Structure formats: structure tokens, C-alpha cells
Image (spheres, helix red, strand yellow):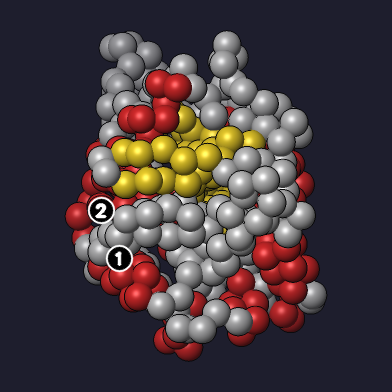
């Protein structure tokens, strides 16, 4: 079975763009579980996924799809200047990929900016999305949201990526050396295969002109009230997760996101920040797996599905 460290890099063409992706774990052909598409954070690539997260998922028999956004990592094309553009590109990619996997839809896990893309995909193409996992992320512009500190955003979009990002991902007064351990795992996971047997060299965290466009897309989403206003139209079972002290996407924003989604569970991880899914990789994978397998509570109905008359209970 392939892992984050060993999976082959694959490519496909969609609407004139060559995308890089990986299929990790066992095929889900013939099973009732769709593959899980992983959408990464703002500067990451398919090479920088934490292997502890990926491999904990595949150990349960789930197939994972990792994917480089257009213009990022090993994918060609231009970085879209908006989250809507990211979602349009992603849908084009899925329209080519999914028939080859003999499925019509995917579960989607979006981390940080990947959660923005996941929300937009669910709005634009609900027939493609089965269930949503939204981690360390929030909605677009709306009521009750908090802004991250300017110093934190400046660090996230530092033109030269370095270890200064670690305190923002992992508040050191509660997480100790967890941040450095995550960074070492993530940037080193592909060292054994990079540059060998047709595999590309490691594509690390994004910088340069691509980062400028990423920043534009990120900040444009933060200023757009439309996706927020449409969240209650997303009729999908959802799981929202956060650390209890997220400095990049404030924890309050994840709670607001869960509240606005009519079919959401919300799980907050203790003594953690933006990188909660990496800090608690095994437990995170267990919670997500139980959600995807239908073992977490689901609402009996939603705004899009009215129960039959007489099933509401007694009323005057």
C-alpha cells in the first residue's frame, strides 16, 4: 500500500492545465466509501503533507487524493487570483479524474485555505461533494468573526518561508517542540524518492510571484460577504475542527463556520493551534474517519429537507 513517503506522482490535463496529484492507499473501487480529497493550506504542496496525517487515514483502508493547485508545487498553469478561481480549476480537475476512479463524488478535507476552496466547491458543485471536513479554517466576511493579529498574517505571507511560522501554527507555550517535529516530518517525507525513478524534486513551501497571487486570493475571500451568506444553503454533513488557540484562523471563526452550516459537528482540540490536526494526527484521523463512516451525530433534517407533517412533535 502506498504512503505519503512512497506514492507515485501522477499528472492529468484539464482545461489546458497539467495538474499533479497522488492516489495514496487502497482503491475504493467497489466500496461504499468515496475517496478523500485533501486540500492543503496556503503555501503547501503535495510534498509537504504531514505523513502522520496521511498515513493514519490510509491505515484504515481509505483512499486519499492529494492535489497541487494550479501554479503551485508540481502543477502547471497560473495561480488563480480568487478562491472562486481555485474552485473552478479544482472542478475541472475532478471532472477528468473521477471517471477514472469509477466514482461521481468525493469526500473533501480542506485545511486552512483549503477549507475556503472546499466551501466554494460545495457551493458551486454540490453534486461532486459527499461530506465536508473543514479544519483550521473559517468562513468569508460575515458577522461575529475575529481578525488575526497583523504580525501573524505578516509571518504567514513572509516572502521567504522559514521557521518563524512555527509559533503561529503551534503556540509554543502549550505545544512545546511539536511545531519543529511537524516541519521536519513534512519537508522530509519525500526525501527517499525525490528525484528518483521519474519522481520530481521536492516542491517546498510557495514563494515568489505565486505567493503574491495566493495572498490576493486569500485576502479577497476574507473581504467577500457572499460565500458567508450562502453557507446555510450547503446541505452536506460537515465536520469542523480547530485548535483551542488558533492564531492564524482564530478559533472563534471556526465556531462561527460550524454554526452557519446546518449539518455540522464541531470538535475543538485542546492545547493546540492552527496545526491541531498534525499535533494530534492519530486522534484527528480517528475523529474524521468516524465522521465519514457516519458514526457522529447528524441532524434529522435540514433547511433543504422538510420532514413529513406530524413528525415535529406536539405543539399548541
Return the x and y of residue 76 as percentages of the image width and height. 38, 54
Return the x and y of residue 233 as percentages of the image width and height. 27, 38
* Quadrant (top left, top right, bottom left, bottom right) of the N terminus: top right
Report the side of 263 relative to 66 (left or right): left
- Residue for point 31% across, 70% down: 213
Q: Is residue 266 visible?
A: yes
Picture layout, residue 15 above or below residue 290:
below
Q: Are marks 2 and 1 in contact (CB under 8 Å)?
A: yes
Helix, strand or loop status at disc 2: helix
Cα distance, mark 2 to mark 1? Answer: 9 Å
- Residue for point 48% across, 59% down: 73
Circle 1 residue? 217
Neighbours of disc 1 within 10 Å: few (<14), some (14-19), many (20+): many
Tell how many labels: 2
Relative depth, front residue between 29 and 294: 29
Q: Residue furthest front?
A: 197
Report the side of 52 relative to 213 (left or right): right
Picture layout, residue 240 above or below residue 43:
above
Quadrant of residue 208 in the image? bottom left
Quadrant of residue 304 in the image? top left
Helix, strand or loop status at disc 1: helix
Amino acid at each position: 500500500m502506498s504512503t505519503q513517503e512512497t506514492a507515485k506522482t501522477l499528472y492529468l490535463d484539464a482545461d489546458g492545465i497539467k495538474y499533479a496529484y497522488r492516489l495514496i492507499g487502497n482503491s475504493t473501487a467497489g466500496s461504499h466509501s468515496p475517496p478523500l480529497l485533501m486540500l492543503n493550506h496556503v503555501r503547501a504542496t503535495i510534498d509537504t503533507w504531514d505523513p502522520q496525517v496521511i498515513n493514519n487515514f490510509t491505515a484504515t483502508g481509505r483512499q486519499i487524493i492529494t492535489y497541487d493547485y494550479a501554479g503551485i508545487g508540481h502543477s502547471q498553469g497560473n495561480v488563480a487570483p480568487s478562491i472562486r478561481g481555485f474552485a473552478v480549476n479544482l472542478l475541472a480537475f475532478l471532472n477528468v479524474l473521477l471517471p477514472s476512479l469509477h466514482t461521481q463524488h468525493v469526500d473533501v478535507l480542506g485545511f486552512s485555505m483549503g477549507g475556503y476552496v472546499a466551501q466554494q466547491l460545495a457551493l458551486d458543485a454540490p453534486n461532486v461533494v459527499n461530506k465536508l471536513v473543514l479544519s483550521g479554517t473559517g468562513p468569508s466576511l460575515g458577522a461575529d468573526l475575529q481578525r488575526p493579529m497583523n504580525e501573524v498574517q505578516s509571518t504567514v505571507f513572509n516572502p521567504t518561508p522559514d521557521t518563524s511560522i512555527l509559533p503561529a501554527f503551534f503556540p509554543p507555550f502549550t505545544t512545546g517542540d511539536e511545531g519543529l517535529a511537524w516541519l521536519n516530518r513534512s519537508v522530509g517525507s519525500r526525501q527517499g524518492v525525490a528525484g528518483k525513478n521519474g519522481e520530481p524534486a521536492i516542491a517546498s513551501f510557495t514563494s515568489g510571484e505565486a505567493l503574491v497571487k495566493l495572498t490576493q486570493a486569500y485576502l479577497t475571500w476574507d473581504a467577500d460577504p457572499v460565500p458567508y451568506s450562502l453557507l446555510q444553503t450547503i446541505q452536506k454533513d460537515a465536520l469542523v475542527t480547530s485548535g483551542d488557540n488558533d492564531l492564524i484562523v482564530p478559533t472563534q471563526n471556526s465556531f462561527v463556520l460550524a454554526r452557519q452550516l446546518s449539518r455540522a459537528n464541531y470538535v475543538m482540540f485542546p492545547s493546540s493551534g492552527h496545526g491541531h490536526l498534525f499535533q494530534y494526527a492519530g486522534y484527528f484521523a480517528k475523529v474524521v474517519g468516524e465522521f465519514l463512516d457516519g458514526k457522529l451525530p447528524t441532524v434529522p433534517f435540514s433547511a433543504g429537507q422538510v420532514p413529513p407533517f406530524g413528525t415535529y412533535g406536539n405543539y399548541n
